[in-house]
Image (cartoon, coloured by chain):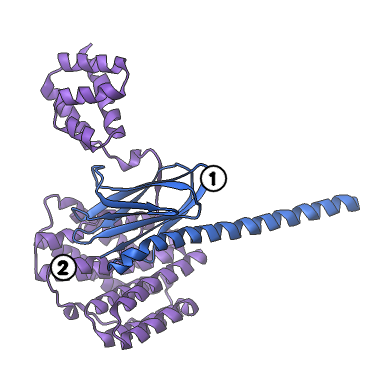
Amino acid sequence: MSFYTRFLRRCSATLILVALCFTATRSHATVDDAHGFAMEAAMPFVEQGFIVREDYWNGEVKSGQKLMIKHQMFKGNEYAFWLGTANDGVTFELKVLDEKGKEITIDSKTSGMFASVRVNPPKTGTYSIVFSVTSKKEVGLFWALAYGYR
Amino acid sequence: MIGFIHLEAKSLSLREVARNDEQSFKGVASGEIRIFVCFTMTRTSFRYFTVLALASAFYPTSVLRAESAKAAVQEFDPQAFPGQVVDDVVVPVPSEVFSVLDKLGEPNWRHELRDVDFPKSSDRAKLALMFGMVVAEGFVSVQAEDKEKVKDIGREVINLATALGLIKAVRPHAQAILDAADKEHWSAIRKEFDQTQKTVRDSMEQMKDLDLSQCVSMGGWLRGTASVTSVVGKNFSADRAELLNQPMLVEHFLVTINKMGSSMKEHAIIADIAKGLTGILAKMEGAVDGFTKESVSEIGKTCDGLLGTIKAAK
């Protein structure tokens, strides 16, 4: 193997490693950013007495792709869900459906990189949170969905 | 011919119901064929309209109503969701249920407190389950506003985290719990217990101990549910009992156990939990007209039995 070939192989390996490190750092940061924006959406709710849960959902999704999460809620509590993304210039869809598919969202707001909805579950049971994030610029988007109750 | 028309009409109504909003759904469910036809006219091709019009003309209205009602029942099938279903389940913390019980009355939470002197063990499954239990006990002690109990629990959190090899991650939370207990800052303590549990589960997941992470959630849910059944049993009402309608969570735990590695799945405690949860799920699914006092008591007994099994296991 010539010196030139060895040199090229080493360069390629280094470039791949750097690219992988960069991708890993970037994806970690953007999911965290998405959660950060979800928490920004939560701030006014906390002032109103909502308790924010530490656990949350997150991931990366194709622009416009609908996602659904099943979640247990208790009648008597009021819930708020906060959806954040790390990308600007996006549009959100966020709604909560009961077991029959009827929307029970009572208040929804969107602002920049986050959206929020409030829910008073009419019964104790499983509900579906359906949402999407759509961007004209990005193909894949990082998202985080957090919730609180009072 | 009629059979063919019927099939067309049925598939059309299902498609429309799946696609459209609640207003259209009401039109279908009420059996008002005229409303339904007008509605479909605006959205479907003339061919479909013709078929539907023929269907309504030839087919008995009552049958079509029955089919429409059937379609309404099938309206929202999460399995058929035209998107991606996120499998992750966030298990509610016990205080989510406790806060409703507080709104429905004033339970004596001090009566619900239990001993937190957990036995020493090197069994990591048992330790993880006990960790979940002790955090849930923490939520009960916050509800009871019992400062000394919170401190005892904070110390037990340290003991269990040490045994699990997670003390470095947990110590700041445990210290924050002890500090907030001195100040009787209950909301801060509640937040710390939630953070403690998340930190422990995240640490386990980083170490590829997904099964152990699920054990923490299961232990917490069992202890929280035991408290709820106890409070509901002491002052029974349909509203309080409805809080036990959590079949999705129980199913989630059963699926989780089923996906566990064979050594964990065959662990005596986990096998007992699977058996107990199966019984609880049957009671939840059987409570179509609401929970009876007896069914609440039976769920409570199952949870208490499992909590005892976890503590007593060698």
Kindly identify the residue that appears in the image at 23 percent across and 54 percent down.
A125
What x and y, as percent, mark residue A59? 47, 53
Looking at the image, residue B153 lies above or below residue B98 = below
Q: Nearer the viewer, residue B12 or B119?
A: B12
- Which residue sits at x=29%, y=34%? B18
Mark 2 in CB contact with mark 1 (< 8 angstroms): no
Q: Are marks 2 and 1 on the same chain?
A: no
> Which chain does the blue colour mark?
A
Q: Quadrant of residue B76?
A: top left
Q: Quadrant of residue B271?
A: bottom left
In the drawing, does residue A24 fall left or right of residue B298?
right
Chain letter for the purple part:
B
Residue found at the far right of this picture = A2
Q: Is residue A139 above or below residue A33?
A: above
Residue B103 is tagged as 2
Viewer-nearest of discs 2 and 1: 1
Mark 2 and mark 1: Cα distance apart in space: 45 Å
Residue B300, image x, y percentages: 19, 67
The kind of secondary structure element at disc 2 is: helix
Give the chain letter at badge 1.
A
Q: Residue at x 50, y 58 (%)?
A: A31
Quick one: quadrant of the C terminus of chain B? bottom left
**Residue nearest the observer in this picture, A50 or A66:** A50
Q: Which residue is mark 1?
A: A138
In-image side of B243 versus B215 (left or right): left
Work out whether residue B194 can be spotted: yes
Q: Quadrant of the N terminus of chain B?
A: top left
Element under disc 1: loop
- Which amino acid type is marked by label 1? Glu
Q: For mark 2, does the 10 Å Cα neighbourhood hold few (<14), some (14 to 19), or many (20 or more) residues?
A: few
Amino acid, disc 2: Lys
The chain identifier of the residue carrying mark 2 reads B
